[in-house]
Image (tube, helix red, strand yellow):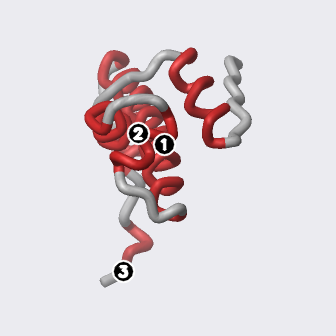
């Protein structure tokens, strides 16, 4: 199979979707990146969701929501998580 002709989904969305769908896709991409950062941290440190929740001072249910990418955390929540995990939170608005 020749994968050279397969385009990234973002190309398809940018070409064919309406503005509202494009905005939703962009937000979902941000939420996915946040969720994967948290999930990767948990896996790399061999933590259960409950253990990570304890470290963050939140519930296991909240960790699950964060990792699912279906929850939109506030900047304050992200800042607190970053501090507790030793990360630097960078927000850029261009």
- Under circle 2, the secondary element is helix
Q: Is residue 2 above or below residue 72?
A: below
Residue found 70% across the figure and 42% down from its top = 86
Q: Nearer the viewer, mark 1 or mark 3?
A: 1
Q: Nearer the viewer, residue 54 or 77?
A: 54
Residue where numbered disc 2 is placed: 53
- Under circle 3, the secondary element is loop
Residue where numbered disc 1 is placed: 33
Give residue 64's quadrant in the image: top left
Q: Is residue 84 above or below residue 48?
A: above
Mark 3 and mark 2 lie on one chain; the one further toward the N terminus is 3
Q: Nearer the viewer, residue 68 or 53?
A: 53
Q: Position of residue 48 (x, y in %)?
A: 36, 55
Q: Is residue 44 left or right of residue 5?
A: right
Q: Are marks 2 and 1 in contact (CB under 8 Å)?
A: no
Label 3 to label 2, Cα distance in Å?
44 Å
Q: Residues within 10 Å of mark 1 (few under 14, many from 20)?
A: some
- Can residue 40 be seen from the camera position used here? yes
Mark 1 and mark 3 lie on one chain; the one further toward the N terminus is 3
Label 2 to label 1, Cα distance in Å?
19 Å
- Can residue 16 be seen from the camera position used here? no
Quadrant holding the C terminus = top right
Q: Position of residue 67 (x, y in %)?
A: 36, 43
Residue where numbered disc 3 is placed: 2
């Amino acid at each position: 199979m020749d994968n050279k002709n397969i385009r990234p989904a973002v190309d398809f969305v940018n070409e064919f979707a309406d503005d509202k769908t494009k905005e939703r896709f962009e937000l979902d991409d941000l939420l996915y990146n946040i969720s994967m950062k948290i999930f990767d941290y948990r896996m790399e440190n061999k933590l259960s969701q409950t253990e990570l929740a304890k470290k963050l001072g939140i519930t296991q249910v909240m960790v699950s929501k964060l990792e699912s990418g279906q929850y939109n955390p506030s900047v304050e929540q992200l800042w607190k998580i970053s501090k507790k995990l030793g990360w630097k939170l960078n927000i850029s608005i261009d």
